[in-house]
């Protein structure tokens, strides 16, 4: 069974999906981490992110390994453990450039489909899982939250030290850039909306799990 979840940044999808996968005994795939790792690699190789051909070549040779264990997330590029480094602000600021490169996107999508097929029972999350990567998934959910709730969570995630206006600009700016690559703000046909604005973390996890149980 494939559980596909999409949503914007700050909707809580990574932590919710990881917890749900862990409770269900399913594998977990954070596709955003793959775009982040590709961006890390481009920056490390000093590939200009506006050089489309060079980005394509870099993503083609990307020596990426991503674990699908929800309780032990490790992401490596070659010998480098990039699990922490890909969360850096420099990656968040540049990742949309890789995500909007059509060839790089196609390569990462093919790799995501391979991982999903290999695992079989998996919670996969991102921006285009319900629509492009796994449109035939048995459970398809768009996890949303109000802009206020998303900003609050993102701020807390970053330790509450960020300037509120700068954070708002960053989050909304990334939404705008990302929406050029995929539409993750509206649910496609057959995709259920789960609004987490007024739900606690565990309530959101439970709601996702109950949708999976209904489909089983
Ligand atoms: O989910 P996260 O914020 O870590 O994703 C990082 C970036 O990866 C997003 O801002 C977006 O540019 C890209 N992404 C994407 N499609 C996905 C997952 C992530 O374009 N399925």
Image (cartoon, grey):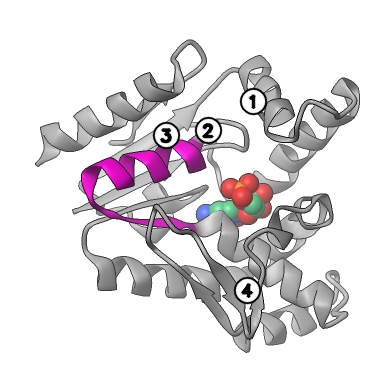
Q: CA distance from mark 1 to mark 2?
A: 8 Å
Q: Measured along the vertical axis of the image, is residue 206 above or below residue 116?
A: above
Front-most of residues 85 and 180: 85
- Nearer to us of marks 2 and 4 is 2
* 82 lies left or right of 30: right
Front-most of residues 104 and 76: 76
Marks 1 and 4, the one that precedes in the sequence: 4
Estimate how packed mark 1 is, as few (under 14), some (14 to 19) or many (20 or more) residues with alpha carbons within 10 Å.
some
Task: Return the residue at label 3.
Answer: 142
Q: CA distance from mark 2 to mark 4?
A: 26 Å
- Nearer to us of marks 1 and 3 is 1
Q: CA distance from mark 1 to mark 3?
A: 18 Å
Cβ(mark 3) to ligand 1 < 8 Å? no
**Residue 58, can we see it?**
yes
Q: Position of residue 16 (x, y in %)?
A: 43, 36
Task: Return the residue at label 1.
Answer: 153
Q: Measured along the vertical axis of the image, is residue 16 above or below residue 118?
A: above
| Residues at marks 1 and 2 touching, judged by CB atoms closer than 8 Å | yes
Furthest toward the front, the residue is 72
Q: Is residue 132 magenta?
A: no
């Amino acid at each position: 069974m494939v559980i596909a979840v999409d949503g914007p940044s700050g909707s809580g999808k990574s932590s919710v999906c990881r917890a749900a996968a862990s409770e269900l005994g399913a594998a977990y795939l954070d596709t955003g981490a793959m775009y982040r790792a590709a961006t890390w690699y481009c920056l490390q190789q000093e590939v200009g992110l506006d050089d489309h051909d060079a980005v394509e070549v870099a993503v083609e040779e990307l020596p990426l390994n991503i674990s699908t264990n929800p309780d032990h997330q490790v992401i490596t590029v070659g010998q480098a453990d990039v699990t922490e480094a890909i969360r850096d602000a420099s990656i968040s600021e540049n990742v949309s450039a890789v995500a909007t490169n059509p060839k790089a996107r196609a390569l990462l999508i093919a790799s995501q489909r391979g991982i999903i097929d290999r695992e079989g029972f998996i919670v996969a999350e991102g921006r285009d899982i319900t629509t492009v990567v796994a449109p035939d998934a048995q459970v398809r959910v768009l996890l949303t939250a109000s802009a206020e709730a998303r900003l609050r969570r993102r701020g807390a995630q970053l330790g509450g030290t960020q300037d509120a206006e700068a954070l708002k600009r960053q989050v909304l700016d990334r939404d705008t850039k990302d929406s050029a690559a995929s539409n993750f703000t509206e649910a496609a046909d057959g995709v259920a909306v789960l609004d987490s604005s007024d739900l606690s973390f565990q309530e959101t996890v439970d709601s996702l799990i109950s949708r999976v149980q209904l489909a089983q």
